Image (cartoon, rainbow, N blue to C red):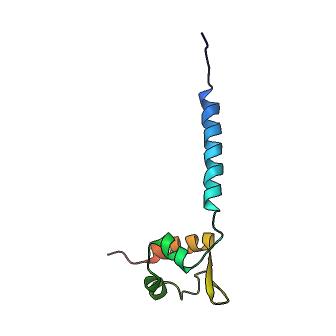
Amino acid sequence: MITVNIDENRAEELFLKELKKRLDHLERRHTFWDMKELCRQTNMSEIFIRETFFYDPRFPKYRVGKKWLFPARECEEFLLMWLKEQPTV
C-alpha cells in the first residue's frame, strides 16, 4: 500500500504562484491594440469610440503611418477611469 501526504498550504502556495504567472503572461499578450482590437476589447463600435472618448486628450493613442495604435495597458487604465466618470441614470 502506498501512502501520499500532501502539505495543503504548500500545494496552495505553488498553485497560486503558477496561476499568477500564467495570468501575467495572458495580460501581456498584446502590447498594442489597433482599432479593430480596441473595438473587440471594449465591445464598442468604432463610431461609438470616436464619438465618446477617442478625442479625449487623456486617451493614449499614437498614429503610425495611417494606422492608430493604442498601448493596451494604458488604454485599460484610461477606459476604467473614463467609465467611472460617466453619468449614471
Relative vertical location of residue 48 with respect to residue 12 in this rendering, above or below: below
Q: Which residue is drawn at 51% across and 70% down?
A: 41
Q: Quadrant of the C terminus?
A: bottom left
* Residue 37 location, quadrant: bottom right
Relative to 89, 64 lies left or right: right
Instruction: Looking at this view, name the residue that lies furthest to the top.
Output: 1
Q: Nearer the viewer, residue 32 or 6?
A: 32
* Residue 10 location, quadrant: top right
Q: Quadrant of the N terminus?
A: top right
Q: Residue at x 44, y 76 (%)?
A: 44
Q: Can residue 40 be seen in this view?
A: yes
Q: Which residue is drawn at 49% across and 76% down?
A: 39
Q: Nearer the viewer, residue 78 or 5?
A: 5
Total number of numbered discs in the rendering:
0
Q: Residue at x 58, y 74 (%)?
A: 75
Instruction: Looking at this view, name the residue that lies furthest to the left.
Output: 89
Question: Picture coordinates of residue 73 (x, y %)?
Answer: 62, 69
Question: Picture coordinates of residue 38 (x, y %)?
Answer: 53, 75
Relative to 43, 74 lies left or right: right
Q: Which of 9 and 70 is in front in this view?
A: 70
Question: Picture coordinates of residue 31 (x, y %)?
Answer: 66, 69
Q: Which of 9 and 31 is in front in this view?
A: 31
Relative vertical location of residue 42 with respect to residue 57 in this rendering, above or below: above
Q: Is residue 61 visible?
A: no
Question: Picture coordinates of residue 84 (x, y %)?
Answer: 46, 72
Relative vertical location of residue 85 with respect to residue 4 in this rendering, above or below: below
